[in-house]
Image (cartoon, rainbow, N blue to C red):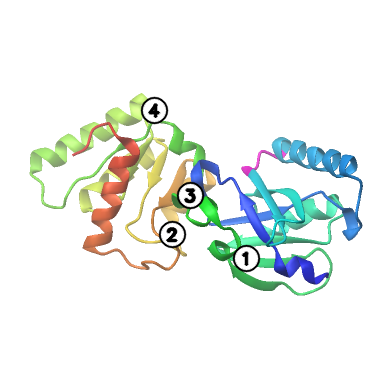
Amino acid sequence: MSPVYRNVHFQAELPQGALPESFGILTAWNPQGQAAEPAVNQAANLALQETLRAKGNLHFPVTGGSADGTYQEVGFGMVASEIETLELARQFNQEAIYFVHRGQVNLVSCGTDPPELLALWRLMAPGAAAHPNFHFKGNLSLITQSPQPFLISSRCTPQQVLDSYAWARAQCDAGTTIISGFHSPVEQDVFNILRRRGANLIWVPGRDLPKVIPQPYQELLQQNRLLIATPFDFQKPSRPTRDTCHKRNQWIEALCQRGTLF
């Protein structure tokens, strides 16, 4: 592959200002690495955009180019697996893609060359894209559905516990999306009520995005009923602490700005 692929810088418009845990970057410009006329490249990229819309994958504008901006290729970030991104890139006769996982950018050939780890996303995408509002995995559209926060300490009265259970059942009946850390014992009980009764959920752990997702949360991800979001960067921190849980709760409150908060 051409060495220019290894010296790329990105300009991106992140969805909701948030960075997905994993996504591919591809373009339809210059098939097989051969320079094409601007009109040809524009038509090819429009066809790629229409394909992404038809597939239903969350996608967003990403432009790759030289550090000084003298050369750029317009493309897209696509929330999908590496295999799915490669298949689409081959469909548009591309030589390679970039695949970003947990903030690390890999150059992946559409041929037989082995993948190469390049650098951290924040070093290759200056500006706002280097400092996302949060990191996420799952159904990002849930963040736009006026989620209602649920936060309750482990130090609560029996009546507050009963009120929490009743509140959870009422939210399910109303079709409300609930956002919480689901950390304290009562929050975990409420999570189980919401999960069984079909609610959409946003889980905000008091740490970075977990590498291992508990089985109940995996099932919700598969059902498109869960968004996992965190204001903490990858590996920072890897375990919740009192301080990070406090910051997490503040982030939830700032995000919602209204709603029932126990």
Figure check: 257 above or below 216: above
Report the mark closest to the observer, 3 or 1: 1
N-term mark: 1 or 2: 1
Residue 206 visible in the snapshot: yes
Camera-nearest label, 1 or 2: 1
Residue 105 is labelled as 1
Residue named by callout 2: 209
Q: Main secondary structure of the magenta part?
A: loop
Identify the residue shown where x is 28% and y is 28%.
170
Q: Position of residue 258 (x, y in %)?
A: 28, 31
For numbered disc 4, what is the local secondary structure?
loop
- Whether the residues at callouts 4 and 1 have beta carbons within 8 Å, the answer is no
As measured in the structure, the alpha-carbon distance from the residue carrying label 1 to the one carrying label 2 is 17 Å
- The residue where tag 4 is placed is 175
Compared with residue 2, is residue 55 higher up or lower down, i.e. above or below? above
In this rendering, the answer to whether 235 lies above or below 28 is: below
Provide the residue designation for mark 3. Answer: 219
Gap between marks 3 and 4, in whole Å? Answer: 19 Å
Question: How many numbered discs sit on the rendered protein?
Answer: 4
Q: Which residues are magenta?
A: 55-59
Examine the rendered structure and indicate whether residue 160 appears above or below residue 102.
above
Q: Which-is-in-front pick, marks 4 and 1?
A: 1
**Residue kind at label 1, given as amino acid type:** Val
Within 10 Å of disc 2 (Cα), the crowding (few <14, some 14-19, many 20+) is many
Point 39% across, 27% down: residue: 175
- Where residue 60 appears, x then y in whole percent? 63, 44
